[in-house]
């Protein structure tokens, strides 16, 4: 407020120094002209005429940019073909675009086309960059747990692309209004803001010219704020919709031994200098131990189908659930939503909430995971692996960062929630095998 008052004072002083209202009217004169405009009927008609076209064209640009970016992210040919014209439009001065559109389309539609063409590349390139930077780690998480289609788009792609789109919107929405009014000013379609600005210039009504400029700035600011509010709200809404798409009614969960493993002469792409052979019976439990960097994580990733071995053969279940060594939570989602995003059939919200409370006593399951401690986040990821569908559970360092009490509690929960599935755990601690009642495989021996 102080800064605004300062610049208003500077403006008033400059107006007094010039002493020519025709050249530089003061803020009081402009305010009086603005009050006169707002109180007239034609004012709102002109604002409605221009706003309808500019906002409509901006929304169309959002839809086209997002659709084209999704296509470009999926098909490289679309990316290559779309880039030259979009770069050309982005680099062309607005006036040149408006003049060409005026020749082709006439004055009535020039503002719509100008806004669309100016906003499209400004939105397309940031959205495409956001799609290119969607976390590969979380992509693997969704792949392993079979999260596809709408749930994947809403729960992963949209929330991670949204910051790029919001940043672009802070520039594009204001630019859309500038391009739209500039097109109206050149084409002067009847009933538009641009036509009235042009008339003010012809009649030398400088206070009105300033007043209409303030109106355009205010409209652009309101639209930008509204667009950004909608976009920011859309992130949590998208996650909730993804959960709705994934959660099934609570029902009876089967508890049958299934999902054994047979590994023959497996040479890993990283870590071990020797081949690995092992057998885990359906419903069996195995703790894989080795020093850091020896290949425990690579072994589990190979079993999950995320890496290819150099040689050897793996026979195991097609459907597994996993907890990864690094954190792979959806940060904008709650603990309950993170678990629900990968939950299998028969697991209702109440059961998921109860599992979280058992693993993390006192947790607020509806709080964003970014508010949780490292140990709490680790146990949320464990809960997610335990309720995900799969015939076998793979856990990579699941007890890292947990104290002895939390570790014992987690082991008890794992034993209860396996429900006949086989279990393979990568760990450094020999006591984990005793806690879980598991056999031990020491790599490198």
Image (cartoon, helix red, strand yellow):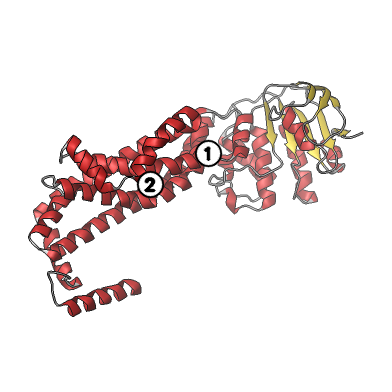
Q: Nearer the viewer, residue 434 or 381?
A: 381
Q: Are marks 2 and 1 in contact (CB under 8 Å)?
A: no
Q: Position of residue 153 (x, y in %)?
A: 49, 34
Most distant residue in the left direction: 203
Name the quadrant of the N terminus: bottom left
Image side of residue 162 versus residue 14, left or right = right
Q: Earlier in the sequence, mark 2 or mark 1?
A: 1
Query: Residue at coordinates 54% horizontally, 28% vertically from top-left?
Result: 148
Q: Find residue 132 and name its label.
A: 1
Query: Residue at coordinates 65% horizontally, 53% vertically from top-left?
Result: 373
Crowding around mark 2 (Cα neighbors within 10 Å: few <14, some 14 to 19, many 20+) is: few
Q: Position of residue 130 (x, y in %)?
A: 49, 42
* 2 or 1: mark nearer the eye: 1
Q: Position of residue 113 (x, y in %)?
A: 25, 39
Query: Residue at coordinates 74% horizontally, 29% vertically from top-left?
Result: 302
Name the quadrant of the C terminus: top right
Can residue 363 be seen here? The reply is yes
Q: Find residue 170 and name its label.
A: none
Can residue 39 be seen here? The reply is no
Query: Residue at coordinates 13% horizontally, 49% vertically from top-left?
Result: 45
Res 388 quadrant in image: top right
Q: Nearer the viewer, residue 180 or 297?
A: 180
Q: Nearer the viewer, residue 388 or 306?
A: 306
Q: Secondary structure at mark 2?
A: helix
Q: Nearer the viewer, residue 280 or 277?
A: 277
The residue where tag 2 is placed is: 230
Image side of residue 110 versus residue 321, left or right = left
Res 196 quadrant in image: bottom left
């Amino acid at each position: 407020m102080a800064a605004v008052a300062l610049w208003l004072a500077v403006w008033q002083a400059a107006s007094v120094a010039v002493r020519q209202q025709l050249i530089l009217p003061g803020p009081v004169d402009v305010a009086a002209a603005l009050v006169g405009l707002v109180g007239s009927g034609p004012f709102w008609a002109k604002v409605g005429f221009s706003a309808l076209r500019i906002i409509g064209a901006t929304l169309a640009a959002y839809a086209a940019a997002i659709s084209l970016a999704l296509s470009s992210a999926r098909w490289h040919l679309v990316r290559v073909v779309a880039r030259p014209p979009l770069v050309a439009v982005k680099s062309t001065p607005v006036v040149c675009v408006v003049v060409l559109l005026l020749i082709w389309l006439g004055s009535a539609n020039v503002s719509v086309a100008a806004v669309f063409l100016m906003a499209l590349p400004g939105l397309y390139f940031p959205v495409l960059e956001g799609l290119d930077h969607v976390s590969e780690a979380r992509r693997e998480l969704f792949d392993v747990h079979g999260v596809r289609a709408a749930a994947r788009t809403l729960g992963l792609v949209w929330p991670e692309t949204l910051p790029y789109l919001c940043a672009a919107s802070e520039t594009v929405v204001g630019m859309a209004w500038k391009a739209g009014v500039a097109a109206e000013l050149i084409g002067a379609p009847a009933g538009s803001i641009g036509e009235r600005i042009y008339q003010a210039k012809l009649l030398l009504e400088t206070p009105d010219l300033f007043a209409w400029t303030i109106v355009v700035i205010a409209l652009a600011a309101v639209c930008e704020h509204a667009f950004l509010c909608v976009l920011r709200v859309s992130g949590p809404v998208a996650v909730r919709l993804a959960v709705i798409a994934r959660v099934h009614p609570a029902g009876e969960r089967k508890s049958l031994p299934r999902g054994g493993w047979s590994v023959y002469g497996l040479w890993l792409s990283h870590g071990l200098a020797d081949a690995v052979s092992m057998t885990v019976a359906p419903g069996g439990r195995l703790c894989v131990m080795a020093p850091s960097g020896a290949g425990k994580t690579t072994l589990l990733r190979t079993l999950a189908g995320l890496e290819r071995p150099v040689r050897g053969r793996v026979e195991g279940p097609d459907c597994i659930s996993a907890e990864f060594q690094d954190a792979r939570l959806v940060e904008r989602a709650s603990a309950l939503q993170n678990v629900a995003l990968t939950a299998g059939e028969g697991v209702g919200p109440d059961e998921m909430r109860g599992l979280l409370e058992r693993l993390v006593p006192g947790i607020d399951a509806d709080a964003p995971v970014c508010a949780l401690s490292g140990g709490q986040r680790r146990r949320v990821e464990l809960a997610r692996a335990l309720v995900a569908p799969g015939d076998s559970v793979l856990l990579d360092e699941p007890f890292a960062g947990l104290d002895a009490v939390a570790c014992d509690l987690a082991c008890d929960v794992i034993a209860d929630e396996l429900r006949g599935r086989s279990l393979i755990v990568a760990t450094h601690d020999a006591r984990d095998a005793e806690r879980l009642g598991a056999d031990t495989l020491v790599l490198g021996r």
